[in-house]
Image (cartoon, rainbow, N blue to C red):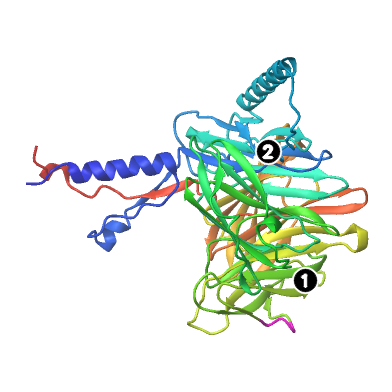
């Protein structure tokens, strides 16, 4: 006799997938290939994003932009909400020095009142959204300033969840960490790889960890240099309190200075958002986001045409060494850069290569492929890109990234200063690029681009008609092979061309769920 338990299990899986959107579900074993093909994709109904504390400088000014594309993936019938809130408890700031002096009772009472007042103020601030998105298709914005700005924790539900994205853009005009620092706020996870970090004396790199959940998370930070693991007990068992952010200066985790370091963040319990804020004495600062998961072939899109220095950093997390061929995908095709044909990466060791001004006035993307056919060793990789010379140098980072997939979005584009790079590493492809309405007004416009096989197309993206405020760019794959994309945002400050690059992987606005394949008519009561 058959029962309804199998159907209940499938229905439960469908509901879970639609609500969380965190994973694609595969059909249970035993189903035929034809039945597996009946799996459908449904829009997610809830998603989370985490924005790290924006800066260490009192001179910092940060703009936040949140956006959900309209149409496309459909969405829940419920209106939903999408808000970015200040972290409820902020552990980003340095601990104050403790004094041995004893205070009298009056001082203690005053301190307690001041502390209670500050606690209430912080709670009120945390309860009020920094950004609140009201409708799909139109960006919402917010601002923060100063060194004390906390990390943000965001949740979107209902029809605002599919494709929800948020951009954090910080401008620091001078002093320590100057630059245009951009980051697409990240999805919480349990495993992150960051090649291109450093413990060199000229660098000050922090790992930022943000916990969105109601219980504490425990994270480990491992460092790998050119000679292997940089052993340290200090990076183990780092507690990230509930609804809070912490930052860790990676040079305090090891006594060894290394120009190229790979940072590996994992969690023992819970999940976090992780990003590295990298700052250099000469070239300024920017965010380094995680490389896509280890793979035999990786793509790093969006090297600016006027890059004066490009450094490649790669790491092989497995037990095998990796021999990688280097391909530059330019306007007319793929070439092997003379003198930079291959990179050997030893297992559990970080390898770096100075590619200098590899683009030579033509925007491009880098692709790393196995040197030997049939022997693909998974790697993670990132680029450190410098524009300008002398005291006008600026830096940005480009991690290896996943394809656009069905759709990807980047927010906070202005009327000028954005460049969109589209790369087709395999077969030719066609994409549709949509410029949304502006945060203050404007009419959306779309444009179609064809990308030849093995090339990179860099364009000034379309701008909404009658734009007021900032807008979002959404890239949708229409046909052909996979496309990798990145957006470069440039802002001139004090005569310096400050810039930042954000890669554009699939927005995971939908999740695959299995179709019920049992005939209800044959089930017994």
Q: Is residue 426 above or below residue 238?
A: below
Residue topped by disc 2: 65
Q: Element type at marker 2? A: strand
Q: Please check the rendered image and state whether residue 48 is part of the magenta-colored stretch, yes or no.
A: no
Q: Position of residue 145 (x, y in %)?
A: 78, 35
Residue 402: horizontal and vertical position, in percent?
56, 60
- Residue pointed to by mark 1: 359
Quadrant including the C terminus: top left
Image: 106 above or below 448? above
- Give yes or no for residue 340 being in the magenta stretch: yes
What residue sits 52% from the left and 69% below the top? 295
Q: What's the magenta region?
A: 338-342
Q: Nearer the viewer, residue 191 or 492?
A: 191
Mark 1 lies on a secondary structure that is loop
Q: Quick one: label 1, few (<14), some, or many (20+) residues within 10 Å?
A: many
**SS majority, magenta:** loop
The quadrant in which residue 171 appears is top right
The front one of 326 and 442 is: 326
Left or right of 231 in this view: 501? right
**Residue at point 90%, 64% (across, down):** 389
Among numbered discs 2 and 1, the one appearing first in the sequence:
2
Is residue 462 at all visible to an observer of this figure? Answer: yes
- Image-based side of 45 in relation to 289, left or right: left
Tell me, for residue 117, which label it has, or none: none
Q: Could you say where residue 310 lies in the image, as x and y percent from the top left?
A: 76, 69
Residue under the point 76% across and 35% down: 469
The picture places residue 86, in percent across and down from the top left corner, at 64, 32
Determine the image quadrant of residue 228.
Answer: bottom right
Q: Nearer the viewer, residue 337 or 242?
A: 242
């Amino acid at each position: 006799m058959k029962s309804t338990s199998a159907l209940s299990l499938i229905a439960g899986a469908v509901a879970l997938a639609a609500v969380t959107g965190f994973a694609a579900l595969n059909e249970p074993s035993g189903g035929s290939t034809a039945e597996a093909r009946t799996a459908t994709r449904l829009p997610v109904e809830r998603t989370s994003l985490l924005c790290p504390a924006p800066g260490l400088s009192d001179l910092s000014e940060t703009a936040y932009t949140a956006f959900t594309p309209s149409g496309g993936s459909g969405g829940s019938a419920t209106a939903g909400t999408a808000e970015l809130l200040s972290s409820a408890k902020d552990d980003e700031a340095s601990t104050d020095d403790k004094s041995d002096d004893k205070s009298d009772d009056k001082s203690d009472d005053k301190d307690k009142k001041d502390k209670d007042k500050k606690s209430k103020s912080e709670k009120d601030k945390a309860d009020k959204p920094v950004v609140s998105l009201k409708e799909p298709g139109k960006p919402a914005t917010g601002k923060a300033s100063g060194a004390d700005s906390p990390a943000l924790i965001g949740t979107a539900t209902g029809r605002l969840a599919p494709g929800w994205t948020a951009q954090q853009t910080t401008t620091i005009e001078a002093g320590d960490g100057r630059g245009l620092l951009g980051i697409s706020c990240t999805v919480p996870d349990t495993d992150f790889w960051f090649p291109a970090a450093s413990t060199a004396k000229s660098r000050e790199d922090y790992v930022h960890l943000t916990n969105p959940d109601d219980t504490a998370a425990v994270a480990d930070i491992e460092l790998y240099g050119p000679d292997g693991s940089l052993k340290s007990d200090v990076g183990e068992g780092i507690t990230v309190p509930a609804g809070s952010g912490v930052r860790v200066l990676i040079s305090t985790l090891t006594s060894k200075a290394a120009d190229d370091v790979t940072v590996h963040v994992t969690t023992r319990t819970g999940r976090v958002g992780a990003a590295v804020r990298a700052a250099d004495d000469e070239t300024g600062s920017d965010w380094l986001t995680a490389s896509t998961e280890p793979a035999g072939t990786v793509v790093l899109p969006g090297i600016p045409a006027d890059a004066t220095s490009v450094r490649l950093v790669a790491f092989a997390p497995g037990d095998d060494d990796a021999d990688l061929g280097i391909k530059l995908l330019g306007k007319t095709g793929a070439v092997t850069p003379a003198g930079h044909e291959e990179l050997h990466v030893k297992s559990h060791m970080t390898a770096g290569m100075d590619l200098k001004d590899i683009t030579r006035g033509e925007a491009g993307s880098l692709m790393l492929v196995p040197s030997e056919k049939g022997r693909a060793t998974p790697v993670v990789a990132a680029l450190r890109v410098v524009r300008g010379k002398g005291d006008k140098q600026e830096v940005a980072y480009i991690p290896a990234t996943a394809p656009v997939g069905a759709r990807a979005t980047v927010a906070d584009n202005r009327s000028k200063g954005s460049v969109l790079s589209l790369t087709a590493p395999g077969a030719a492809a066609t994409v549709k690029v949509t410029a949304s309405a502006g945060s203050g007004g404007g009419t959306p416009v779309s444009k179609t681009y064809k990308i030849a096989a093995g090339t990179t197309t860099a364009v000034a993206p379309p701008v909404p008609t009658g734009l007021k405020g900032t807008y979002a760019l959404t890239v949708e794959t229409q046909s052909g092979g996979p496309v990798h994309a990145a957006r470069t945002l440039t802002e001139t400050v004090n005569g310096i061309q400050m810039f930042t690059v954000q890669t554009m992987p699939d927005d995971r606005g939908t999740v695959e769920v299995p179709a019920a394949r049992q005939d209800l008519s044959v089930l017994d009561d």
